[in-house]
Amino acid sequence: MSESEDRFFATVAARQLVRASVRAIVIDGDRVLLQRPADATPEHHYGFIGGEYEVGDTFESRLRQEIDEETNARLLYWEYLLVAENRFVHNDHRIHALEHYLLAVIDRADVTSREAHLVQE
């Protein structure tokens, strides 16, 4: 994993809480929008755009905020798909997460990152 991912998972594990998040699955024909840390090589793993819930969030408000913060796109529509429970160990840190996945429609196909530490492809 990349250095930024190592720091991220160490921080998440230190809280000793289940991490609840929402993720956008954006499909355009035969293409799927994914992102990766900028310091990870393209053959590294990818993830879906999204983030951890904060107090007062709804699926839509969190997803809209993450898309707005991380990309040049805007959320137009969403539909709930599923929740996945993930448990894994990263560098001796136990991680437990509940990730809600939403089918998302955005306003553009030419998505670029607004955050230097992320790359969307």
Image (cartoon, grey):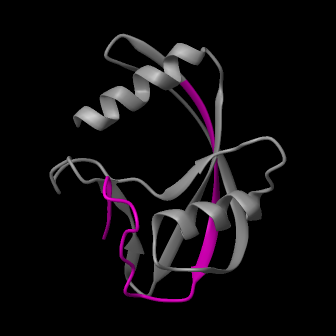
Q: Is residue 16 visible?
A: yes
Image position, residue 101 (x, y; %): 62, 56
Foreground residue among 94 and 16: 16
Q: Is residue 88 visible?
A: no
Does residue 106 belong to the magenta stretch? yes
Question: Taking 40 as reference, is 111 left or right?
Answer: right
Question: Taking 15 as reference, is 56 left or right?
Answer: right
Q: Is 56 situated above or below 23?
A: above
Question: Taking 99 as reference, is 59 left or right?
Answer: right
Question: Taking 41 as reference, is 76 left or right?
Answer: right
Image position, residue 93 (x, y; %): 42, 14
Foreground residue among 31 and 10: 10
Q: Quadrant of residue 85?
A: top right
Position of the C terminus, as image quadrant, is bottom left
Residue at the spot 42% in from the left edge and 27% down from the top edge: 9
Residue at the spot 15% in from the left edge and 51% down from the top edge: 41
Position of the N terminus, as image quadrant, is top left
Does residue 100 belong to the magenta stretch? yes
Residue at the spot 20% in from the left edge and 47% down from the top edge: 40
Residue at the spot 36% in from the left edge and 76% down from the top edge: 112
Foreground residue among 110 and 96: 110
Furthest residue toward right: 56
The span shown in magenta is 96-121
